[in-house]
Amino acid sequence: MSTWTVETKRGQWSIPTSDTAAANSARDRQSRLTKPPGSLGALEEVAVKLAALQGTTLPRSRPAAALLFASDHAVTRHGVSPYPQAVTGAMVENFLRGGAASSVLCRHLGVPLRVVDVGVMRPLSPPSVEGVSFRRDPVADEPGGDLRVEDAMSEATFQRALAAGAAEVDKLPDDVRVVVLGEMGIGNTTVAAAVAALLLGREAEEVVGRGTGVDEAGLARKVEVVRDAVRRLRGVSPEQAVRSAGGRDIAALIGAAARAIELRKAVLVDGFIVSVAMLALERMAPGAREWMLFAHRSAEAGHRHVLEALGARPLLELGMRLGEGSGALTALPLVDAACALHAGMATFEEAGVPDKGQG
């Protein structure tokens, strides 16, 4: 299979092409299964897409693994969230004790959860339960700026955050087929909205949402903060948009997805924040989007615009806006079902059922 290589300021990301022959073979199999063509809707599309990515007529969704990157954000000083910054660290500990939504979903689905601290301000000494592991990357100790008035990361911190994400993918077992990406960080919907506005050329009001539930005054503060960041940075490159207005969690998500794609693993994309990271990756490394499955449409206002820019049709729309990879984990059983139906259903010939047009 051929690849093309994209040069970036951080070196080379080799984005593989999908396997057209495998996709055609999977599509042919779908046409011969005992059902009207297209009657399983998006599940058929998921199976064919995974066949193309894995280079086989019968793709698999398992093993899967979940990576969650956590970071605080200096922009919280402007009152953009109803929750204090300390919640980020407390929630990391909740993940590791098994009490967070994503922890429960991972346990229910039999998916290992890896939580990576790339910027939590308060020291953590968390216990963990079976199936959940934790690492604090050294990039977490580096300072972060307030995107409203200064760059969120230095170039060196940006590079190290990308590398932190990639390193976690390198630690996954070789046979992992699907990587679920998630995040945790008070203030990160503000950060993601600023990056989205820069990547999409949109105004702050079009991409800012209520996040964790800000009131009208809080929403107005978020809009003003993002407006100031966009005014300061309008016209910058995708890399500069992430470095200057993003966070270490978003950079780590980009690095993780890029490495997963290099290793021919499908990326199951969560909601608004992860989707913004994936849009940045696609702008930095065209072709990366081909390796992404989009789990759900978030209730966050800007997510619609990001999905449109990526040409994405998500599997679910449930009004979710929690983050943490929860939407992607909720969609994973649909990906499982797509593969199971594709591999397990009988063809008309195998079942002795007359096909359309046969007497």
Image (tube, helix red, strand yellow):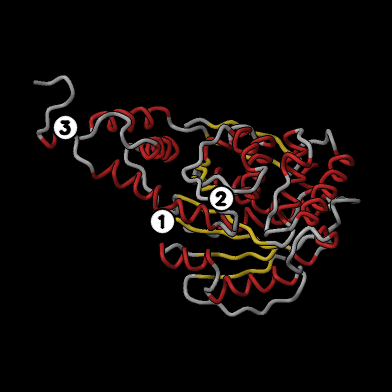
* Mark toward the start of the polypeptide (2 vs 1): 1
Q: Which residue is mark 1?
A: 63
| Amino acid of disc 2 | Asp
Q: What separation in Å lies between label 3 and label 2 (alpha carbons)? A: 36 Å
**Percent x, y for residue 187?**
74, 58
Mark sitting on residue 281: none
Which residue position holds label 2?
270
Q: CA distance from mark 1 to mark 3?
A: 30 Å
Q: Could you tell me which residue is drawn at 68 percent across and 59 percent down?
A: 213
Left or right of 19 in this view: 356: left
SS type, badge 2: loop
Disc 2 from disc 1: Cα separation: 18 Å
Q: How many marks?
A: 3
Q: Which of the 4 image quarters holds residue 310?
A: top right
Q: Residue at x 76, y 35 (%)?
A: 202
Q: Nearer the viewer, mark 1 or mark 3?
A: 3
Amino acid type, callout 3: Phe
Farthest residue to the front: give it.
216
**Residue 263: horizontal and vertical position, in percent?**
52, 46
Q: Which mark is nearer the camera, 2 or 1? A: 2
Q: Is residue 254 above or below residue 134?
A: above
Instruction: From the image, tell me which residue sits under label 3.
Output: 348
Horizontal relation, residue 276 to residue 15: left or right: right
Q: Residue at x 58, y 80 (%)?
A: 127
Residue type highlighted by circle 1: Pro
- Mark 2 residue crowding within 10 angstroms, few (<14) / some (14–19) / many (20+): many
